[in-house]
Image (cartoon, rainbow, N blue to C red):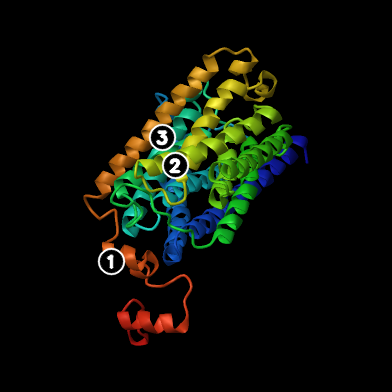
Amino acid sequence: MDVATLSGGLDTIWVVLTAAMILLMEGGFALLEAGFVRQKNAVSIIMKVFVDIAFGALVFYFFGFALMYGKDMSGIIGSSGFMMGGDLTHINLTISHDTYWLFQCAFVIAVISIVSGAVAERMNFHAYILYTIAMTGIIYPIAGHWVWSVGGWLGKLGMIDFAGSAVIHALGGFSALAAAIIVGPRIGKFGPDGTANIVPPSNLPLASVGAFILWFGWFGFNSGSTLSATNGSIGHIAVTTMLAAASGSATCILFTMLRYRKSDPPMVINGALAGLVGITAGCAFVSDGAAILIGAVCGIAMVFATEFLESKRIDDPVGAFAVHGVSGSLGTLAVGLFAKPELTKGIGQEYSGLFYGGGFSLLGVQALGLVVVCIWGFALTWIAFKTIKLFVPVRVSRDEELVGLDVGIHGVPAYSQEHDFIELNQLGSIPSKESR
């Protein structure tokens, strides 16, 4: 066996394993969101995650991948690769196109999972399926083509987004913001005078485990984006990822102690995630110290963003916009500040951030790309929801929301006892033996 064949085999194993790590993050999303919402809506969160994986994978296979990575048309959209067929020779990698698709499929599933948390506890399940198709088949793939594909116009300008602070997280976060605004706040979240009422999480230990799983999967998210098992930057990427997450969480522990006189557990959980989101764009290109600073800034910004949304009566139960939209934006801009030229050599050209003598050139490109991607995600989500609303309601009925989506929509509670089953059966939520 020659060296090239061995290297290609190692790269394939590496990419498949890291893709599996990213897919495991869906378990993290499920536990995190189920822990943050009320007990009566835990099953609905799990069902949305299954929609993310099942519909997301199929839609991305049939046409999402083609629009994202197919042969370029004017820097805007791909035109080949539908059902993995057609001309994909421009994707020049040491791994097969099937392997590459699997890794990218894990990414697209993560994007839609960001939005699911922002509309938790009140979105119609049918409408969510339709939006999942729109996000995984059109909204995300086209934005991704602009930045990551061969010939994408933002990529040609020099935009750097190593593993997706902009393409995945800022896009997902601003899409989540649009969705939360259109669906509206949960019943009772805000009082008549606009003050926000506390809706206690149902299970913070569960949410914490979800965050730990996401933290673990993020090493696949970032390090796996090398697409090569022999890439010398894997270790550095893993270190910056770890430091940013730790910094985000530690900063939130101290900051909330000062601000609220108590360390706020949901904020601390989201602080770690904010650090992870923020480092995703530049994990391969910034120093360890910069990673710590990025994590800290993202953690504090997440707290303020959460408070800002509540002041505007926008209900985001899990902090999707604050974590992903805000931190993804800051992380994308941070590349324009902290990119070290010696660390960017691996992408074919040396780029220097503002603090390393590069002037405002890279920062300007990063800002342009960020604005375009965020506007695209927000606007297309707004259009998608308004279009879906013509066919099915985007929000559940008042009665369904009050009783909980688990029983109201899916006909089963998350934590049932024998007497619960009898009561539900009498209400007709569970089919009788004769009707099965």
Which residue is disc 1 drawn over?
399
Q: Which mark is residue 345?
A: none
Q: Is the C terminus in the top left, top right, bottom left or bottom right quadrant?
A: bottom left
- Classify residue 85 as left or right of residue 241: left
Mark 3 falls on what kind of element?
helix
Mark 3–mark 2 distance (CA, rounded to whole Å): 32 Å
- Classify residue 123 as left or right of residue 19: left
- Picture coordinates of residue 326 (x, y %)? 48, 36
Q: Give the residue at x 49% y 59%.
A: 201
Q: Quadrant of residue 334?
A: top right
Q: Earlier in the sequence, mark 1 or mark 3?
A: 3
Q: Quadrant of residue 74?
A: top left
- Classify residue 333 as left or right of residue 174: right
Which residue is disc 2 drawn over?
307
For label 2, the crowd category at 10 Å Cα-Cα, with few meaning under 14, some 14 to 19 and many 20 or more, is some
Mark 2 falls on what kind of element?
helix
Q: Give the residue at x 65% y 44%.
A: 219
Badge 3 amino acid: Ile
The reply to whether discs 3 and 2 touch (Cβ–Cβ < 8 Å) is no
Mark 2–mark 1 distance (CA, rounded to whole Å): 29 Å
